[in-house]
Image (tube, rainbow, N blue to C red):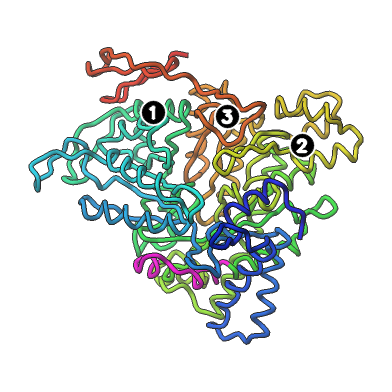
Protein backbone atom coordinates (compact mmCIF):
# COMPACT_ATOMS: atom_id res chain seq x y z
CA UNK A 1 0.00 0.00 0.00
CA UNK A 2 1.14 3.54 -0.71
CA UNK A 3 2.33 5.51 2.30
CA UNK A 4 -0.55 7.46 3.80
CA UNK A 5 -0.04 11.04 4.94
CA UNK A 6 -0.35 12.10 8.56
CA UNK A 7 -3.61 13.86 7.69
CA UNK A 8 -4.98 10.75 5.96
CA UNK A 9 -4.18 8.55 8.94
CA UNK A 10 -5.83 11.02 11.31
CA UNK A 11 -9.01 10.98 9.23
CA UNK A 12 -9.05 7.20 8.90
CA UNK A 13 -8.51 6.64 12.62
CA UNK A 14 -11.23 9.02 13.69
CA UNK A 15 -13.89 8.33 11.06
CA UNK A 16 -13.39 5.07 9.18
CA UNK A 17 -11.47 2.33 10.97
CA UNK A 18 -13.31 -0.06 13.27
CA UNK A 19 -12.99 0.38 17.04
CA UNK A 20 -13.88 -1.82 19.99
CA UNK A 21 -16.39 -0.88 22.69
CA UNK A 22 -13.69 1.12 24.48
CA UNK A 23 -12.84 3.18 21.41
CA UNK A 24 -9.58 1.36 20.65
CA UNK A 25 -8.68 0.77 17.01
CA UNK A 26 -9.09 -2.83 15.88
CA UNK A 27 -8.64 -2.26 12.15
CA UNK A 28 -5.85 -1.06 9.86
CA UNK A 29 -6.37 0.74 6.52
CA UNK A 30 -5.51 -2.54 4.79
CA UNK A 31 -8.08 -4.30 6.94
CA UNK A 32 -10.70 -1.70 6.04
CA UNK A 33 -10.13 -2.22 2.32
CA UNK A 34 -10.27 -6.02 2.77
CA UNK A 35 -13.54 -5.70 4.68
CA UNK A 36 -15.08 -3.52 1.98
CA UNK A 37 -13.80 -5.60 -0.95
CA UNK A 38 -15.12 -8.84 0.55
CA UNK A 39 -18.51 -7.37 1.33
CA UNK A 40 -19.05 -5.80 -2.10
CA UNK A 41 -17.71 -8.82 -4.02
CA UNK A 42 -20.10 -11.13 -2.15
CA UNK A 43 -22.95 -9.68 -4.25
CA UNK A 44 -21.59 -11.60 -7.25
CA UNK A 45 -22.98 -14.84 -5.78
CA UNK A 46 -26.56 -13.79 -6.43
CA UNK A 47 -25.67 -13.42 -10.13
CA UNK A 48 -24.39 -16.98 -10.42
CA UNK A 49 -20.62 -16.65 -9.94
CA UNK A 50 -18.73 -19.42 -8.19
CA UNK A 51 -16.53 -18.96 -5.10
CA UNK A 52 -13.27 -18.94 -7.07
CA UNK A 53 -14.58 -16.25 -9.43
CA UNK A 54 -15.86 -14.18 -6.52
CA UNK A 55 -12.46 -14.38 -4.84
CA UNK A 56 -10.82 -13.05 -8.01
CA UNK A 57 -13.21 -10.10 -8.14
CA UNK A 58 -12.67 -9.46 -4.43
CA UNK A 59 -8.92 -9.32 -5.07
CA UNK A 60 -9.42 -6.84 -7.92
CA UNK A 61 -11.67 -4.63 -5.76
CA UNK A 62 -9.08 -4.72 -2.97
CA UNK A 63 -6.27 -3.77 -5.35
CA UNK A 64 -8.30 -0.83 -6.66
CA UNK A 65 -8.52 0.59 -3.16
CA UNK A 66 -5.19 -0.44 -1.64
CA UNK A 67 -3.36 1.21 -4.57
CA UNK A 68 -5.56 4.30 -4.09
CA UNK A 69 -6.62 4.12 -7.74
CA UNK A 70 -10.32 4.17 -6.79
CA UNK A 71 -12.24 4.84 -3.60
CA UNK A 72 -15.99 4.53 -3.00
CA UNK A 73 -17.93 7.17 -1.09
CA UNK A 74 -17.42 7.44 2.67
CA UNK A 75 -20.51 5.48 3.83
CA UNK A 76 -19.30 2.44 1.87
CA UNK A 77 -15.85 2.60 3.47
CA UNK A 78 -17.40 3.15 6.91
CA UNK A 79 -20.29 0.70 6.81
CA UNK A 80 -19.63 -2.17 4.38
CA UNK A 81 -19.49 -5.41 6.36
CA UNK A 82 -20.58 -3.68 9.55
CA UNK A 83 -23.77 -3.03 11.52
CA UNK A 84 -25.47 -0.38 9.39
CA UNK A 85 -24.55 -1.69 5.92
CA UNK A 86 -25.90 1.63 4.60
CA UNK A 87 -23.56 2.40 1.72
CA UNK A 88 -25.11 5.28 -0.23
CA UNK A 89 -23.99 8.89 0.18
CA UNK A 90 -26.81 10.85 -1.41
CA UNK A 91 -30.54 10.93 -0.68
CA UNK A 92 -33.43 13.19 -1.66
CA UNK A 93 -36.55 13.18 0.49
CA UNK A 94 -39.92 14.67 -0.54
CA UNK A 95 -41.74 17.24 1.57
CA UNK A 96 -45.43 17.88 1.03
CA UNK A 97 -47.47 20.75 2.48
CA UNK A 98 -48.57 19.13 5.72
CA UNK A 99 -47.24 18.80 9.25
CA UNK A 100 -47.27 15.01 8.88
CA UNK A 101 -45.11 15.09 5.75
CA UNK A 102 -42.72 17.69 7.14
CA UNK A 103 -41.99 15.76 10.32
CA UNK A 104 -41.91 12.39 8.54
CA UNK A 105 -39.17 13.89 6.35
CA UNK A 106 -37.36 15.13 9.45
CA UNK A 107 -37.49 11.66 11.05
CA UNK A 108 -36.30 10.00 7.83
CA UNK A 109 -33.45 12.49 7.50
CA UNK A 110 -32.33 11.69 11.04
CA UNK A 111 -32.21 7.98 10.22
CA UNK A 112 -30.19 8.68 7.06
CA UNK A 113 -27.76 11.02 8.82
CA UNK A 114 -27.18 8.47 11.55
CA UNK A 115 -26.13 5.95 8.90
CA UNK A 116 -23.69 8.33 7.20
CA UNK A 117 -25.78 9.72 4.33
CA UNK A 118 -26.61 13.30 3.38
CA UNK A 119 -30.04 14.60 2.42
CA UNK A 120 -31.49 17.01 -0.10
CA UNK A 121 -34.90 18.67 0.11
CA UNK A 122 -36.99 20.99 -2.00
CA UNK A 123 -39.17 23.05 0.34
CA UNK A 124 -41.16 24.71 -2.44
CA UNK A 125 -44.42 22.84 -1.83
CA UNK A 126 -44.78 24.44 1.60
CA UNK A 127 -47.22 27.35 1.73
CA UNK A 128 -45.62 30.77 2.19
CA UNK A 129 -45.28 32.72 5.40
CA UNK A 130 -48.57 34.35 6.43
CA UNK A 131 -50.72 32.01 4.35
CA UNK A 132 -53.89 30.48 5.75
CA UNK A 133 -53.86 27.31 7.87
CA UNK A 134 -57.46 26.11 7.88
CA UNK A 135 -57.08 23.43 10.54
CA UNK A 136 -56.02 25.94 13.18
CA UNK A 137 -57.39 29.19 11.73
CA UNK A 138 -53.83 30.44 12.02
CA UNK A 139 -51.15 31.51 9.58
CA UNK A 140 -48.26 29.53 8.13
CA UNK A 141 -44.70 30.21 9.23
CA UNK A 142 -43.22 29.43 5.80
CA UNK A 143 -40.53 27.05 4.50
CA UNK A 144 -37.56 28.88 6.02
CA UNK A 145 -38.93 28.40 9.53
CA UNK A 146 -39.14 24.64 8.97
CA UNK A 147 -35.65 24.55 7.51
CA UNK A 148 -34.42 25.91 10.83
CA UNK A 149 -36.05 22.96 12.60
CA UNK A 150 -34.30 20.54 10.24
CA UNK A 151 -31.05 22.37 10.86
CA UNK A 152 -31.38 22.09 14.64
CA UNK A 153 -32.02 18.35 14.37
CA UNK A 154 -29.00 17.90 12.12
CA UNK A 155 -26.83 19.67 14.68
CA UNK A 156 -27.57 16.92 17.17
CA UNK A 157 -27.26 13.87 14.93
CA UNK A 158 -23.81 12.99 13.69
CA UNK A 159 -23.51 11.28 10.32
CA UNK A 160 -22.40 7.71 10.96
CA UNK A 161 -21.44 8.78 14.47
CA UNK A 162 -18.64 10.86 12.97
CA UNK A 163 -19.96 14.22 11.76
CA UNK A 164 -23.07 16.38 11.76
CA UNK A 165 -25.62 15.76 9.08
CA UNK A 166 -25.25 17.52 5.73
CA UNK A 167 -28.29 18.92 3.93
CA UNK A 168 -29.23 20.68 0.73
CA UNK A 169 -32.18 23.02 0.97
CA UNK A 170 -33.75 24.22 -2.28
CA UNK A 171 -36.50 26.72 -2.97
CA UNK A 172 -37.96 27.42 -6.39
CA UNK A 173 -37.36 30.94 -7.65
CA UNK A 174 -41.11 31.53 -8.05
CA UNK A 175 -41.97 30.80 -4.39
CA UNK A 176 -43.40 33.85 -2.56
CA UNK A 177 -40.78 33.48 0.23
CA UNK A 178 -37.84 33.55 -2.16
CA UNK A 179 -36.40 36.80 -0.77
CA UNK A 180 -36.38 35.47 2.78
CA UNK A 181 -34.73 32.29 1.51
CA UNK A 182 -32.03 34.11 -0.47
CA UNK A 183 -31.08 36.28 2.50
CA UNK A 184 -31.48 33.76 5.35
CA UNK A 185 -27.77 32.92 5.61
CA UNK A 186 -26.80 36.55 5.91
CA UNK A 187 -26.74 35.59 9.57
CA UNK A 188 -23.75 33.20 9.77
CA UNK A 189 -25.30 31.35 12.72
CA UNK A 190 -28.40 30.27 10.79
CA UNK A 191 -28.72 27.00 8.80
CA UNK A 192 -25.14 26.00 9.52
CA UNK A 193 -25.84 22.40 8.48
CA UNK A 194 -27.38 23.40 5.15
CA UNK A 195 -26.11 24.30 1.76
CA UNK A 196 -28.88 26.26 0.06
CA UNK A 197 -29.63 26.74 -3.60
CA UNK A 198 -32.28 28.54 -5.61
CA UNK A 199 -33.92 26.43 -8.32
CA UNK A 200 -33.82 28.74 -11.32
CA UNK A 201 -35.93 28.14 -14.43
CA UNK A 202 -35.36 29.09 -18.05
CA UNK A 203 -38.42 31.33 -17.77
CA UNK A 204 -36.80 33.27 -14.93
CA UNK A 205 -33.50 33.63 -16.78
CA UNK A 206 -35.31 34.96 -19.84
CA UNK A 207 -37.27 37.44 -17.71
CA UNK A 208 -34.04 38.56 -16.05
CA UNK A 209 -32.25 39.08 -19.37
CA UNK A 210 -35.24 40.98 -20.78
CA UNK A 211 -35.55 43.05 -17.59
CA UNK A 212 -39.20 42.18 -16.98
CA UNK A 213 -41.28 40.92 -14.12
CA UNK A 214 -42.14 37.29 -13.37
CA UNK A 215 -44.84 35.81 -11.09
CA UNK A 216 -44.47 34.48 -7.54
CA UNK A 217 -46.96 31.66 -7.10
CA UNK A 218 -48.53 30.32 -3.92
CA UNK A 219 -47.93 26.54 -4.06
CA UNK A 220 -51.10 25.84 -2.08
CA UNK A 221 -53.53 27.78 -4.28
CA UNK A 222 -51.43 27.79 -7.49
CA UNK A 223 -52.37 31.46 -7.84
CA UNK A 224 -50.10 34.41 -8.53
CA UNK A 225 -49.36 36.33 -5.33
CA UNK A 226 -47.52 39.19 -6.97
CA UNK A 227 -45.07 39.92 -9.75
CA UNK A 228 -41.51 41.04 -9.09
CA UNK A 229 -38.67 42.22 -11.28
CA UNK A 230 -36.53 39.21 -12.14
CA UNK A 231 -33.37 41.30 -12.37
CA UNK A 232 -33.77 42.56 -8.80
CA UNK A 233 -34.16 39.03 -7.46
CA UNK A 234 -31.15 37.90 -9.49
CA UNK A 235 -29.07 40.84 -8.26
CA UNK A 236 -30.00 40.06 -4.66
CA UNK A 237 -29.03 36.43 -5.18
CA UNK A 238 -25.67 37.49 -6.63
CA UNK A 239 -25.07 39.91 -3.76
CA UNK A 240 -25.69 37.23 -1.13
CA UNK A 241 -23.51 34.69 -2.97
CA UNK A 242 -20.71 37.28 -3.13
CA UNK A 243 -21.09 38.15 0.50
CA UNK A 244 -21.83 34.76 2.13
CA UNK A 245 -21.06 32.06 -0.50
CA UNK A 246 -24.77 31.13 -0.22
CA UNK A 247 -27.05 30.56 -1.93
CA UNK A 248 -25.84 28.67 -4.95
CA UNK A 249 -28.14 27.93 -7.85
CA UNK A 250 -29.37 24.87 -9.68
CA UNK A 251 -30.68 25.28 -13.21
CA UNK A 252 -33.68 23.04 -12.74
CA UNK A 253 -34.84 22.97 -16.38
CA UNK A 254 -31.34 22.06 -17.56
CA UNK A 255 -31.34 19.24 -14.99
CA UNK A 256 -34.71 17.87 -16.08
CA UNK A 257 -33.79 17.94 -19.76
CA UNK A 258 -31.18 15.31 -18.83
CA UNK A 259 -33.49 13.37 -16.47
CA UNK A 260 -32.98 9.73 -17.56
CA UNK A 261 -36.40 8.60 -16.32
CA UNK A 262 -38.88 11.43 -17.00
CA UNK A 263 -41.72 8.91 -17.09
CA UNK A 264 -41.12 8.20 -13.40
CA UNK A 265 -41.12 11.81 -12.26
CA UNK A 266 -39.49 15.24 -12.26
CA UNK A 267 -36.26 15.99 -10.46
CA UNK A 268 -36.78 18.61 -7.75
CA UNK A 269 -33.61 18.48 -5.67
CA UNK A 270 -29.99 17.37 -5.43
CA UNK A 271 -27.77 15.87 -2.77
CA UNK A 272 -25.93 18.25 -0.37
CA UNK A 273 -23.09 19.13 -2.74
CA UNK A 274 -25.18 19.30 -5.89
CA UNK A 275 -23.48 16.62 -7.98
CA UNK A 276 -26.43 14.20 -7.96
CA UNK A 277 -29.90 15.43 -9.01
CA UNK A 278 -32.37 12.85 -7.72
CA UNK A 279 -36.05 12.03 -7.81
CA UNK A 280 -37.95 12.01 -4.51
CA UNK A 281 -36.86 8.99 -2.39
CA UNK A 282 -33.90 8.26 -4.63
CA UNK A 283 -30.39 7.56 -3.37
CA UNK A 284 -27.10 7.19 -5.19
CA UNK A 285 -23.71 5.75 -4.36
CA UNK A 286 -20.55 7.36 -5.68
CA UNK A 287 -16.90 6.54 -6.25
CA UNK A 288 -13.90 8.39 -7.62
CA UNK A 289 -10.88 7.36 -9.66
CA UNK A 290 -7.60 8.99 -8.70
CA UNK A 291 -6.50 9.98 -12.21
CA UNK A 292 -3.15 11.28 -10.89
CA UNK A 293 -2.12 7.61 -10.66
CA UNK A 294 -2.55 7.09 -14.40
CA UNK A 295 0.22 9.32 -15.77
CA UNK A 296 3.10 7.37 -17.28
CA UNK A 297 5.97 9.05 -19.12
CA UNK A 298 3.98 12.31 -19.35
CA UNK A 299 1.03 10.52 -20.96
CA UNK A 300 -2.25 9.19 -19.63
CA UNK A 301 -2.24 5.39 -19.45
CA UNK A 302 -5.66 4.90 -20.97
CA UNK A 303 -5.31 1.14 -21.14
CA UNK A 304 -4.95 0.81 -17.36
CA UNK A 305 -7.60 3.49 -16.85
CA UNK A 306 -10.02 1.45 -18.95
CA UNK A 307 -9.58 -1.60 -16.71
CA UNK A 308 -10.06 0.57 -13.64
CA UNK A 309 -13.30 2.12 -14.96
CA UNK A 310 -14.66 -1.35 -15.71
CA UNK A 311 -14.01 -2.63 -12.22
CA UNK A 312 -15.21 0.60 -10.59
CA UNK A 313 -18.58 0.45 -12.40
CA UNK A 314 -19.00 -3.19 -11.41
CA UNK A 315 -18.12 -2.27 -7.82
CA UNK A 316 -20.68 0.55 -7.67
CA UNK A 317 -23.41 -1.58 -9.25
CA UNK A 318 -22.74 -4.22 -6.58
CA UNK A 319 -23.04 -1.55 -3.87
CA UNK A 320 -26.68 -1.02 -4.87
CA UNK A 321 -27.47 -4.63 -3.96
CA UNK A 322 -25.20 -4.80 -0.90
CA UNK A 323 -26.71 -1.69 0.68
CA UNK A 324 -29.38 -1.86 3.37
CA UNK A 325 -31.51 1.19 2.66
CA UNK A 326 -33.12 2.85 5.67
CA UNK A 327 -36.59 3.10 4.12
CA UNK A 328 -38.72 0.85 1.92
CA UNK A 329 -39.52 3.65 -0.55
CA UNK A 330 -35.81 4.30 -1.05
CA UNK A 331 -35.01 0.62 -1.59
CA UNK A 332 -37.67 0.32 -4.27
CA UNK A 333 -36.76 3.31 -6.44
CA UNK A 334 -32.98 2.86 -6.07
CA UNK A 335 -33.20 -0.71 -7.35
CA UNK A 336 -35.61 0.37 -10.10
CA UNK A 337 -33.22 3.00 -11.50
CA UNK A 338 -29.83 1.69 -10.25
CA UNK A 339 -28.10 5.07 -10.48
CA UNK A 340 -24.38 5.24 -9.76
CA UNK A 341 -21.95 8.16 -9.93
CA UNK A 342 -18.37 7.42 -11.01
CA UNK A 343 -16.15 10.48 -10.95
CA UNK A 344 -12.54 11.50 -10.58
CA UNK A 345 -10.12 13.14 -8.20
CA UNK A 346 -6.48 14.15 -8.64
CA UNK A 347 -7.16 16.06 -11.85
CA UNK A 348 -4.93 19.02 -10.91
CA UNK A 349 -2.14 16.59 -10.01
CA UNK A 350 -2.57 14.92 -13.38
CA UNK A 351 -2.16 18.25 -15.17
CA UNK A 352 0.96 19.07 -13.14
CA UNK A 353 2.53 15.76 -14.14
CA UNK A 354 1.64 16.47 -17.76
CA UNK A 355 3.15 19.97 -17.33
CA UNK A 356 -0.12 21.60 -18.38
CA UNK A 357 -1.40 24.80 -16.77
CA UNK A 358 -4.85 24.50 -15.15
CA UNK A 359 -7.19 26.89 -16.95
CA UNK A 360 -5.31 26.82 -20.24
CA UNK A 361 -6.92 25.68 -23.48
CA UNK A 362 -4.80 22.54 -23.31
CA UNK A 363 -6.21 21.77 -19.86
CA UNK A 364 -9.77 21.97 -21.22
CA UNK A 365 -8.81 19.62 -24.05
CA UNK A 366 -7.41 17.09 -21.58
CA UNK A 367 -10.55 17.39 -19.42
CA UNK A 368 -12.76 16.80 -22.46
CA UNK A 369 -10.74 13.83 -23.67
CA UNK A 370 -10.41 12.24 -20.23
CA UNK A 371 -14.06 12.46 -19.18
CA UNK A 372 -15.35 11.40 -22.59
CA UNK A 373 -13.17 8.29 -22.32
CA UNK A 374 -14.39 7.49 -18.79
CA UNK A 375 -18.03 7.92 -19.79
CA UNK A 376 -17.66 5.65 -22.85
CA UNK A 377 -15.86 2.96 -20.86
CA UNK A 378 -18.48 3.19 -18.11
CA UNK A 379 -21.27 2.77 -20.68
CA UNK A 380 -19.54 -0.29 -22.17
CA UNK A 381 -19.34 -1.88 -18.74
CA UNK A 382 -22.97 -1.03 -17.93
CA UNK A 383 -23.98 -2.62 -21.24
CA UNK A 384 -22.07 -5.77 -20.31
CA UNK A 385 -23.70 -5.84 -16.89
CA UNK A 386 -27.10 -5.41 -18.55
CA UNK A 387 -26.37 -8.51 -20.62
CA UNK A 388 -25.34 -10.45 -17.50
CA UNK A 389 -27.90 -9.12 -15.03
CA UNK A 390 -30.59 -7.26 -16.97
CA UNK A 391 -31.32 -3.58 -17.62
CA UNK A 392 -32.51 -1.36 -14.79
CA UNK A 393 -36.25 -2.07 -14.22
CA UNK A 394 -37.39 1.43 -15.23
CA UNK A 395 -35.53 1.17 -18.53
CA UNK A 396 -38.70 1.07 -20.67
CA UNK A 397 -39.69 4.70 -21.24
CA UNK A 398 -36.30 6.04 -20.19
CA UNK A 399 -34.16 8.23 -22.44
CA UNK A 400 -32.14 5.11 -23.35
CA UNK A 401 -35.13 3.01 -24.44
CA UNK A 402 -34.39 1.54 -27.86
CA UNK A 403 -30.98 3.24 -28.09
CA UNK A 404 -28.64 1.56 -25.63
CA UNK A 405 -29.30 -1.16 -23.05
CA UNK A 406 -27.80 -0.17 -19.73
CA UNK A 407 -27.73 -1.61 -16.23
CA UNK A 408 -27.69 1.87 -14.66
CA UNK A 409 -29.82 4.96 -15.31
CA UNK A 410 -26.82 7.18 -14.58
CA UNK A 411 -23.14 6.31 -14.52
CA UNK A 412 -21.03 9.40 -13.94
CA UNK A 413 -20.89 12.23 -11.42
CA UNK A 414 -18.16 14.59 -10.19
CA UNK A 415 -18.21 14.73 -6.39
CA UNK A 416 -16.09 17.10 -4.24
CA UNK A 417 -14.02 14.17 -2.81
CA UNK A 418 -12.96 16.27 0.18
CA UNK A 419 -12.16 13.38 2.51
CA UNK A 420 -11.44 10.78 -0.17
CA UNK A 421 -8.74 12.95 -1.73
CA UNK A 422 -7.11 13.33 1.70
CA UNK A 423 -6.97 9.53 2.01
CA UNK A 424 -5.71 9.14 -1.56
CA UNK A 425 -3.16 11.95 -1.12
CA UNK A 426 -4.23 13.80 -4.23
CA UNK A 427 -5.91 17.04 -5.29
CA UNK A 428 -9.66 17.27 -4.78
CA UNK A 429 -12.05 16.31 -7.56
CA UNK A 430 -11.51 18.43 -10.70
CA UNK A 431 -10.39 21.46 -8.69
CA UNK A 432 -7.05 23.12 -9.11
CA UNK A 433 -4.78 22.94 -6.08
CA UNK A 434 -5.99 25.31 -3.37
CA UNK A 435 -2.43 26.43 -2.55
CA UNK A 436 1.08 24.98 -2.64
CA UNK A 437 1.16 25.16 1.16
CA UNK A 438 -2.02 25.73 3.13
CA UNK A 439 -3.70 25.32 6.48
CA UNK A 440 -6.41 22.62 6.73
CA UNK A 441 -8.78 22.37 9.68
CA UNK A 442 -10.61 19.08 10.03
CA UNK A 443 -12.01 16.65 12.60
CA UNK A 444 -13.55 19.24 14.86
CA UNK A 445 -10.67 21.67 15.01
CA UNK A 446 -7.47 19.72 14.34
CA UNK A 447 -5.13 21.79 12.17
CA UNK A 448 -2.72 20.38 9.57
CA UNK A 449 -0.36 22.27 7.30
CA UNK A 450 -0.41 20.55 3.92
CA UNK A 451 2.43 20.79 1.41
CA UNK A 452 1.68 19.75 -2.16
CA UNK A 453 3.65 16.49 -2.48
CA UNK A 454 4.37 16.99 -6.18
CA UNK A 455 5.86 20.42 -5.53
CA UNK A 456 7.99 19.08 -2.68
CA UNK A 457 9.21 16.22 -4.88
CA UNK A 458 10.08 18.49 -7.82
CA UNK A 459 11.73 21.08 -5.57
CA UNK A 460 14.01 18.44 -4.08
CA UNK A 461 14.81 16.85 -7.44
CA UNK A 462 15.61 20.23 -9.01
CA UNK A 463 17.69 21.33 -6.02
CA UNK A 464 15.85 24.50 -4.94
CA UNK A 465 14.08 23.07 -1.88
CA UNK A 466 14.82 24.72 1.47
CA UNK A 467 13.03 25.28 4.76
CA UNK A 468 13.25 29.03 4.21
CA UNK A 469 11.57 28.70 0.81
CA UNK A 470 8.74 26.58 2.20
CA UNK A 471 8.18 29.07 5.01
CA UNK A 472 7.92 31.84 2.45
CA UNK A 473 5.41 29.87 0.38
CA UNK A 474 3.39 29.05 3.50
CA UNK A 475 2.76 32.74 4.13
CA UNK A 476 1.25 33.39 0.70
CA UNK A 477 0.22 29.97 -0.58
CA UNK A 478 1.40 30.60 -4.13
CA UNK A 479 4.77 30.40 -5.90
CA UNK A 480 3.91 32.65 -8.84
CA UNK A 481 6.12 35.54 -7.66
CA UNK A 482 9.03 33.56 -6.18
CA UNK A 483 11.76 34.08 -8.74
CA UNK A 484 14.19 31.48 -7.40
CA UNK A 485 11.74 28.86 -8.64
CA UNK A 486 12.01 28.18 -12.40
CA UNK A 487 9.16 29.80 -14.35
CA UNK A 488 7.99 26.58 -15.98
CA UNK A 489 7.47 25.13 -12.50
CA UNK A 490 5.79 28.26 -11.15
CA UNK A 491 3.34 28.19 -14.05
CA UNK A 492 2.09 24.63 -13.55
CA UNK A 493 1.48 25.14 -9.82
CA UNK A 494 -1.25 27.68 -10.42
CA UNK A 495 -3.58 27.91 -7.41
CA UNK A 496 -7.35 28.23 -7.01
CA UNK A 497 -7.34 31.99 -6.42
CA UNK A 498 -5.09 32.59 -9.45
CA UNK A 499 -7.35 30.83 -11.96
CA UNK A 500 -9.78 33.24 -13.59
CA UNK A 501 -13.48 32.89 -12.69
CA UNK A 502 -14.27 32.20 -16.34
CA UNK A 503 -11.72 29.37 -16.46
CA UNK A 504 -13.23 27.77 -13.36
CA UNK A 505 -16.67 27.78 -14.99
CA UNK A 506 -15.35 26.55 -18.33
CA UNK A 507 -13.66 23.61 -16.60
CA UNK A 508 -16.91 22.67 -14.90
CA UNK A 509 -18.83 22.95 -18.17
CA UNK A 510 -16.24 20.84 -20.02
CA UNK A 511 -16.66 17.97 -17.58
CA UNK A 512 -20.45 18.38 -17.53
CA UNK A 513 -20.60 17.51 -21.24
CA UNK A 514 -19.65 13.93 -20.37
CA UNK A 515 -21.35 13.54 -16.98
CA UNK A 516 -24.82 11.99 -16.58
CA UNK A 517 -25.51 13.49 -13.17
CA UNK A 518 -23.87 16.81 -12.33
CA UNK A 519 -20.53 18.36 -11.41
CA UNK A 520 -19.74 19.68 -7.95
CA UNK A 521 -17.19 22.44 -8.33
CA UNK A 522 -16.50 25.62 -6.44
CA UNK A 523 -15.54 28.78 -8.28
CA UNK A 524 -12.91 30.07 -5.87
CA UNK A 525 -12.62 33.84 -5.93
CA UNK A 526 -10.08 36.12 -4.25
CA UNK A 527 -11.29 38.37 -1.45
CA UNK A 528 -11.04 41.31 -3.85
CA UNK A 529 -13.59 39.81 -6.28
CA UNK A 530 -16.57 42.04 -7.01
CA UNK A 531 -20.31 41.45 -7.19
CA UNK A 532 -20.03 41.79 -10.96
CA UNK A 533 -17.46 38.98 -11.00
CA UNK A 534 -20.01 36.71 -9.34
CA UNK A 535 -22.71 37.80 -11.76
CA UNK A 536 -20.53 36.90 -14.74
CA UNK A 537 -19.88 33.48 -13.22
CA UNK A 538 -23.59 32.69 -12.79
CA UNK A 539 -24.48 33.88 -16.28
CA UNK A 540 -21.64 31.98 -17.91
CA UNK A 541 -22.51 28.79 -16.05
CA UNK A 542 -26.07 28.98 -17.39
CA UNK A 543 -24.93 29.72 -20.94
CA UNK A 544 -22.41 26.85 -20.96
CA UNK A 545 -24.92 24.24 -19.78
CA UNK A 546 -23.83 23.71 -16.18
CA UNK A 547 -26.52 22.18 -13.97
CA UNK A 548 -25.67 24.44 -11.05
CA UNK A 549 -22.99 26.78 -9.77
CA UNK A 550 -21.43 27.74 -6.45
CA UNK A 551 -18.93 30.48 -5.68
CA UNK A 552 -16.71 31.00 -2.69
CA UNK A 553 -15.00 34.34 -2.19
CA UNK A 554 -12.01 33.87 0.07
CA UNK A 555 -12.80 35.02 3.61
CA UNK A 556 -16.53 35.39 3.02
CA UNK A 557 -17.35 33.02 5.88
CA UNK A 558 -16.28 33.37 9.49
CA UNK A 559 -14.82 29.89 9.40
CA UNK A 560 -13.25 28.11 6.45
CA UNK A 561 -11.63 24.68 6.32
CA UNK A 562 -8.80 25.69 3.97
CA UNK A 563 -6.83 28.89 4.44
CA UNK A 564 -3.52 30.48 3.63
CA UNK A 565 -1.07 31.80 6.20
CA UNK A 566 -2.30 31.84 9.77
CA UNK A 567 -5.94 31.42 8.75
CA UNK A 568 -7.15 34.62 10.35
CA UNK A 569 -10.81 35.55 10.22
CA UNK A 570 -11.20 37.47 6.98
CA UNK A 571 -14.98 37.77 6.92
CA UNK A 572 -16.33 41.27 6.47
CA UNK A 573 -17.63 42.56 9.78
CA UNK A 574 -21.37 42.48 10.25
CA UNK A 575 -22.70 45.61 11.86
CA UNK A 576 -25.81 46.14 13.91
CA UNK A 577 -28.95 46.46 11.84
CA UNK A 578 -30.00 49.97 10.91
CA UNK A 579 -33.56 50.48 9.78
CA UNK A 580 -34.58 52.89 7.04
CA UNK A 581 -37.24 53.15 4.38
CA UNK A 582 -36.82 51.23 1.13
CA UNK A 583 -36.77 53.66 -1.84
CA UNK A 584 -38.73 51.12 -3.90
CA UNK A 585 -41.59 49.82 -1.75
CA UNK A 586 -41.45 52.00 1.36
CA UNK A 587 -41.07 49.09 3.80
CA UNK A 588 -38.26 48.70 6.31
CA UNK A 589 -34.90 48.70 4.56
CA UNK A 590 -32.18 46.73 6.35
CA UNK A 591 -28.49 47.62 6.29
CA UNK A 592 -26.55 44.67 7.72
CA UNK A 593 -23.17 45.09 6.19
CA UNK A 594 -20.63 47.76 5.43
CA UNK A 595 -20.72 46.95 1.73
CA UNK A 596 -24.34 46.15 0.90
CA UNK A 597 -27.96 47.00 1.64
CA UNK A 598 -31.09 45.09 0.74
CA UNK A 599 -34.83 45.09 1.26
CA UNK A 600 -36.37 41.80 2.38
CA UNK A 601 -39.81 42.82 1.07
CA UNK A 602 -39.25 43.66 -2.59
CA UNK A 603 -35.67 42.51 -3.19
CA UNK A 604 -34.21 45.97 -3.83
CA UNK A 605 -30.46 45.82 -3.24
CA UNK A 606 -27.57 48.21 -3.40
CA UNK A 607 -23.86 47.55 -3.30
CA UNK A 608 -21.88 50.28 -1.54
CA UNK A 609 -18.47 49.31 -2.86
> Which residue does the image show at 37% across and 31% down from the upper left?
208
Per the model, the C-alpha gap separating discs 3 and 1 is 21 Å
Name the secondary structure under disc 2: helix
Image marks 3 and 1: residues in contact by CB distance under 8 Å? no
Q: Residue furthest right?
A: 463
Quick one: label 3 or label 2, which is nearer the N terminus?
A: 2
Mark 3 vs mark 1: which is more N-terminal? 1
Residue at the spot 85% in from the left edge and 29% down from the top edge: 485
Vertical relation: 546 (above or below) 560: below
User: Which of the pair 387/278 is nearer the observer?
Assistant: 278
Q: What's the mark number on residue 492?
A: 2
Question: Which residue is the site of mark 3?
Answer: 525
> In terms of sequence position, does the residue under pointer 2 or pointer 1 come before the other?
1
Looking at the rendering, the stretch of residues picked out in magenta corresponds to: 316-333
Residue 311 sits in quarter: bottom right
x, y (%) of residue 476?
Answer: 70, 25
CA separation, marks 2 and 1?
A: 39 Å
Q: Quadrant of residue 111?
A: bottom left
Q: Nearer the viewer, residue 410 or 9?
A: 9
Q: Is residue 126 left or right of residue 513?
A: left
Amino acid sequence: MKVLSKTAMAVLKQRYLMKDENGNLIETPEGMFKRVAKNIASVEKRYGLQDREIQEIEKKFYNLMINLDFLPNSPTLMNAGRKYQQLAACFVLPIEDSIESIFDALKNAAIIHQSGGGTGFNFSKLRPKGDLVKSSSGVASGPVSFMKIFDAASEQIKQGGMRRGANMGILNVNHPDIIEFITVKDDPNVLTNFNISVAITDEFMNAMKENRKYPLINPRTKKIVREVEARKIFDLLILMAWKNADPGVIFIDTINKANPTPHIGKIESTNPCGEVPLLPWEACNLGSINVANFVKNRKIDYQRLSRTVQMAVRFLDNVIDACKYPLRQIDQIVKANRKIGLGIMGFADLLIQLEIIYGSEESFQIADELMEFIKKEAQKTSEQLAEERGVFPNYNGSIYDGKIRLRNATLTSIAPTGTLSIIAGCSSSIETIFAVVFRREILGGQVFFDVNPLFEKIAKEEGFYSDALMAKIAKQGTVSNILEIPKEIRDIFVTALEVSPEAHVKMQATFQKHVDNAVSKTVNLPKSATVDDVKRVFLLAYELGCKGITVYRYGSKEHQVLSIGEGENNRNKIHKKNEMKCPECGSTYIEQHTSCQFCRTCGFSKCLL
